[in-house]
Image (cartoon, rainbow, N blue to C red):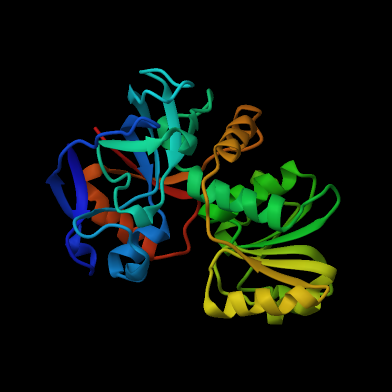
Amino acid sequence: MKAIVIRQYGAREVLEPTEVPDPEPDEDELLVRIHAFAINPIDWKIRKGVARWFMRKKFPIILGQDFSGEVVSVGSKVGDYEIGDRVFGAVSALRGEGSYAEYIAVPAKNVATLPANMSFEEAAAIPTAGLSALIALRDLGRLQTGMDVLINGAAGGVGHYAVQIAKFFGAYVTAICGPDNQDFVTDLGADEAWDYKQVDYTKKPDRYNVIFDTIGNRTFRESIPVLQPKGIFISTMPSPYQYLQMFLTRFTPKKSKTFLLHVEEDDLWELKKMAEADQLRSHVEHLFPFEQIAEAQALSESAHLRGKIVVQIG
């Protein structure tokens, strides 16, 4: 099969289109022919060597987490899927046998069937960003109807799903984004949209039950004044500072939380149900052919993106 591999860490020039053996699925896995995959920051961070100490596979490494496609083989211990099923899902990029390829062997617990109202490209955009938003708001933020939520980076990959998921749980949503994206996030459901160039939310008189920082440029400390007495600050960017804050705030009413993404089958099915109920949609801002993977990663590294970047195969 064709795949994009790296044989060393470095700049985008290390991305190498090549032929590799087809993966052989275990008895609890599916073999999926990939139609589309999404670009996530973890992809190019691994390429640069940022996570080299946590990689589970030596070179050559196939990057990528998110994918959608068709089942072509079903393991003997997999009972819920058939050949031809259209699925979407994710694997851990750290395993080094990812989705930048024509085929992927994936545990059945890491997929769900494609939302009936979505294309392969729209579904491929969901897993990493959608799961991050769901876990942050539902599990860490314990979102309930009537809560006030602020989403920093509301127009991005995680952010644009977070706006929709927060509204699904009945929250009043304040979205922080660039000036060109205010109408975009309002259309997604945000009750208010503020231009980050004009408004510093930490200086406003408003108070929030949950502040969700999807881009990692704000801190718990500077957000304390605008959190409700038992408010929660959530970051998608784990760091020694974030983990220290999370530990220290175990003993305070206001909490700082962060997390490492884990893929749960039930959560993928929850996102599928939201999509089919027209309560969650993917905005694919940029669509690239497989041969332009370097350009796709370059765009992801540039930041200030709206929605997701997706790559088509075939």
Report if residue 122 is visible in the image: no
x and y percent of residue 287 in the render?
35, 43
Q: Is residue 307 above or below residue 109?
A: below
Q: Quadrant of residue 252?
A: bottom right
| Residue 119, horizontal then vertical, whole percent | 44, 29
Task: Pick the quarter of the image with the N terminus.
Answer: top left
Task: Count the numbered circles shown.
Answer: 0
Q: Is residue 211 left or right of residue 157?
A: right
Q: Position of residue 72 (x, y in %)?
A: 31, 23
Considering only vertical position in the picture, is 296 above or below 270?
A: below
Q: Would residue 233 be seen by someone viewing this image from the given angle?
A: yes
Residue at position x 75%, y 62% from top? 210
Q: Quadrant of the C terminus?
A: top left
Q: Nearer the viewer, residue 19 or 208?
A: 19
Left or right of residue 269: residue 224: right
Residue sitting at the far left: 19
Q: Residue at x 70, y 80 (%)?
A: 248
Residue displayed at 58% across by 50% down: 160
Question: Position of 59 compared to 100: left or right?
Answer: left
Residue 36, position in %: x, y?
A: 35, 37
Quarter of the view holding residue 243: bottom right
Asked whether 214 or 71 is in front, the reply is 71
